[in-house]
């Protein structure tokens, strides 16, 4: 948005002196011209234009790397909100380079082994994409989806998460904010199981029968999956997401599962005291 200002300048008033006739051999001083002294007194100083408000600093661009050849395909990205925090950017950059180095090494080894044994080689793949879950004054919550293929029938997709603690300037896992894994499990197990079965029924086209003995019909431990923290009101964490990888709650064909729970009093009670102010109960 551009801001403009009007500058008001009062024009000085000039009065013309009337010509007086000169008689005889002398001259008479006509005195000051009418209004001349008033012009000098009433001239207003220029009014300064209001200063335009300083523009906010530009948000740094995120990073997106992509490399593809006959041996491997590599991609890694993270958003500008993460790039704006130097220490966090360094963490993600180091992870990017470590992942790329590991992929290159394993892909070259896999290709050499396939050629030695006379098997067709299919290029290895590794892709990681970090996104913002929520950006709060004291916290930046991120989640990532990671896909990897290193031969076999199909690749595998898993999730990860990260919290940047702006006050302490450190990266944390969401589970670290809770008093213990047992306390977290006790706070979310029942609503998580109900939500998981609802998602199972939606994917399978029918209700899930607990205790039926059928594969992928029982509930699982939510704390063994990826936990993400989100916010609806953008002031505090008020929802928890549990990201479940394929094969954990259902067959590969069903893909990943995601169950989102509102923050409750029970969940707040399971937190370490120093982090409770960062959460808000959804009523």
Image: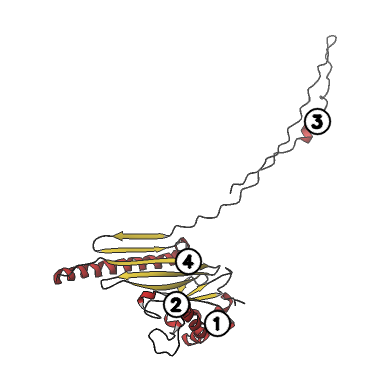
What residue is at 36 percent from the left and 64 percent from the top?
A: 76
Q: Nearer the viewer, residue 182 or 90?
A: 182
Of circles 2 and 4, the one toward us is: 2
Q: How many marks?
A: 4
Task: Please identify the quarter of the rendering in which residue 234 is found.
Answer: bottom right
Mark closest to the chain's N terminus, 2 or 1: 2
Q: Are marks 3 and 2 in contact (CB under 8 Å)?
A: no
Disc 2/disc 1 C-alpha distance (Å): 31 Å
Disc 4/disc 1 C-alpha distance (Å): 23 Å
Label 4, on which residue? 132
Q: Position of residue 61 (x, y in %)?
A: 44, 57
Mark closest to the chain's N terminus, 3 or 1: 3
Task: Please identify the quarter of the rendering in which residue 263 is found.
Answer: bottom right
Mark closest to the chain's N terminus, 3 or 4: 3
Disc 2/disc 4 C-alpha distance (Å): 32 Å
Q: Position of residue 194 (x, y in %)?
A: 50, 82
What residue is at 43 percent from the left and 75 percent from the top?
A: 203
As helix, strand or loop, the secondary structure at mark 4 comes to: strand
What residue is at 47 percent from the left and 80 percent from the top?
A: 196
Label 2, on which residue? 205
Disc marking residue 37: 3
Left or right: 224 in relation to 5: left
Q: Residues within 10 Å of mark 4 (few under 14, many from 20)?
A: some
Q: Residues within 10 Å of mark 1 (few under 14, many from 20)?
A: many
Q: Are marks 2 and 4 in contact (CB under 8 Å)?
A: no
């Amino acid at each position: 948005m551009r801001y403009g200002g009007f500058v008001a300048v009062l024009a000085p008033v000039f009065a013309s002196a009337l010509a007086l006739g000169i008689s005889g051999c002398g001259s008479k001083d006509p005195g000051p011209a009418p209004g001349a002294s008033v012009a000098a007194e009433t001239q207003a100083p220029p009014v300064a234009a209001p200063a335009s408000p300083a523009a906010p600093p530009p948000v740094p661009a995120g990073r997106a790397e992509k490399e593809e050849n006959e041996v491997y395909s590599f991609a890694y990205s993270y958003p500008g909100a993460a790039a704006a925090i130097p220490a966090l950017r360094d963490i993600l950059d180091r992870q990017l380079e470590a992942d790329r180095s590991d992929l290159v090494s394993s892909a070259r080894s896999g290709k050499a082994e396939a050629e030695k044994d006379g098997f067709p080689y299919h290029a290895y793949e590794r892709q990681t994409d970090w996104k913002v879950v929520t950006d709060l004054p004291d916290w930046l919550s991120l989640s990532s989806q990671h896909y990897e293929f290193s031969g076999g029938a199909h690749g595998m997709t898993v999730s990860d998460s990260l919290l940047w603690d702006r006050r302490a300037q450190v990266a944390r896992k969401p589970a670290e904010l809770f008093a213990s894994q047992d306390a977290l499990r006790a706070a979310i197990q029942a609503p998580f199981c109900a939500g998981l079965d609802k998602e199972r029924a939606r994917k399978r086209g029918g209700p899930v029968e607990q205790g039926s003995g059928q594969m992928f019909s029982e509930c699982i431990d939510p704390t063994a999956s990826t936990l993400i923290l989100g916010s609806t009101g953008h002031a505090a964490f008020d929802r928890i997401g549990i990201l479940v990888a394929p094969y954990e709650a259902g067959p590969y064909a069903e893909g990943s599962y995601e169950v989102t729970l509102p923050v409750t009093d029970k969940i707040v009670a399971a937190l370490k005291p120093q982090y409770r102010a960062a959460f808000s109960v959804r009523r």
